[in-house]
Amino acid sequence: MDIASSSVPSHLSLIRKASEKAARGGNIVDLQLANSVAVIIGGAKGIGQAIVRGFAQEGAHVAIVDVDTGVQSLADELAAATSAQTLAAVADATDYESLQTIAARVISEFGRVDHLIYAAGAGSGKYGFPFWNLSPADWQRVLDINLLGAVNAAHAFTPEMTAARQGTVLFLSSIAGQIGSQTDPPYSAAKAAVINFAQCAAKDLAQYDVRVNTICPGMVKTAVNESVWQAWQNAQPESQQLSYDEWATAKIAATTPLNRWQEPADVAALALYLASPLAHNITGQTMNVDGGIVMHS
């Protein structure tokens, strides 16, 4: 169904309505994302799935893209449980032509793209400390998924936004990209590059009123996080090995001022806000959801 003609109020009118509602003592939690179209790449599991669910619960229409074939069952579930129209596509983000095909399909079925979220990611599965514990051959796939996949997504989907002169783009990076984490050097370097590319894109797209931001999660219980533990575990003598929960508890206590896990829903909440017109003056920013691990002056 083509929903291009659906009414999507302007940023200013939405902000005015929210302000008026607040003045009356009302709740301004409504993020005004209903009937918008969101494309989430890497949306089948973890943080990506939490973002997909958040958009659907807000009444947005969602296109879910992932290498995991489970995207179809997720799309079917959300279509049955919410007002969202859904589209599922199985694709590898490192394949630019596949993303171009999906972009055309989204436009054909939904009529437009309002929000692009790149949540795909992967580590090397190996442990640094020092970096030469990995070989140069361990780097390419990590760079392809985390960085070039993000670049592919931007090239495939932002032309529709620039033509419409509105939209938002969000990249999922990591605090590892800010602190030069030695745990997985290819992952840290790739995520740092994502932050830099997002800033370039934010400058380029601002003239079209397309905003670009980055979220850096901290300790979130995801497959990528568990792979970090597994790589560490494999490098330890048997006497020093810990279960995943033991390792995570010790790491959180040592590094995280709030001393707790960050949840996928925590990241999704910020992602939805950044997509909303309430964030209409936020672009080119890198925001951490990490319990205070990284603090900037």
Image (tube, helix red, strand yellow):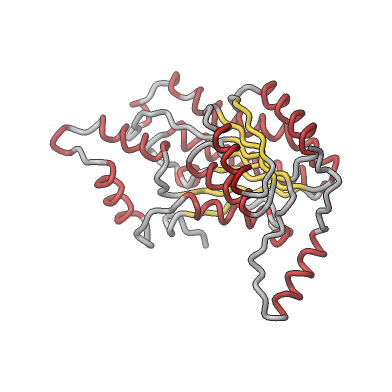
In the picture as drawn, the residue positioned furthest to the left comes out as 239
Q: Is residue 93 left or right of residue 110?
A: left
Q: Position of residue 74 (x, y in %)?
A: 55, 38
Q: How many marks?
A: 0
Q: Nearer the viewer, residue 136 or 292?
A: 292
In the picture as drawn, the residue positioned furthest to the front comes out as 80
| Quadrant of res 19 | bottom right
- Image height check: is 45 above or below 269? above
Q: Is residue 100 left or right of residue 48?
A: right
Which residue is pictured at 44% across the width and 49% down the height? 218
In the picture as drawn, the residue positioned furthest to the bottom comes out as 24
Q: Position of residue 93 (x, y in %)?
A: 60, 27
Q: Nearer the viewer, residue 27 or 170?
A: 27
Q: Nearer the viewer, residue 244 or 171?
A: 244
Q: Position of residue 291 (x, y in %)?
A: 43, 58
Which residue is pictured at 37% across the width and 25% down the height? 134
Q: Quadrant of the N terminus?
A: top right
Q: Is residue 269 left or right of residue 154?
A: left
Q: Position of residue 188 (x, y in %)?
A: 47, 38
Which residue is pictured at 38% across the width and 54% down the height? 261
| Quadrant of res 64 | top right
Which residue is pictured at 79% across the width and 35% down the height? 159
- Image height check: is 211 above or below 132? below
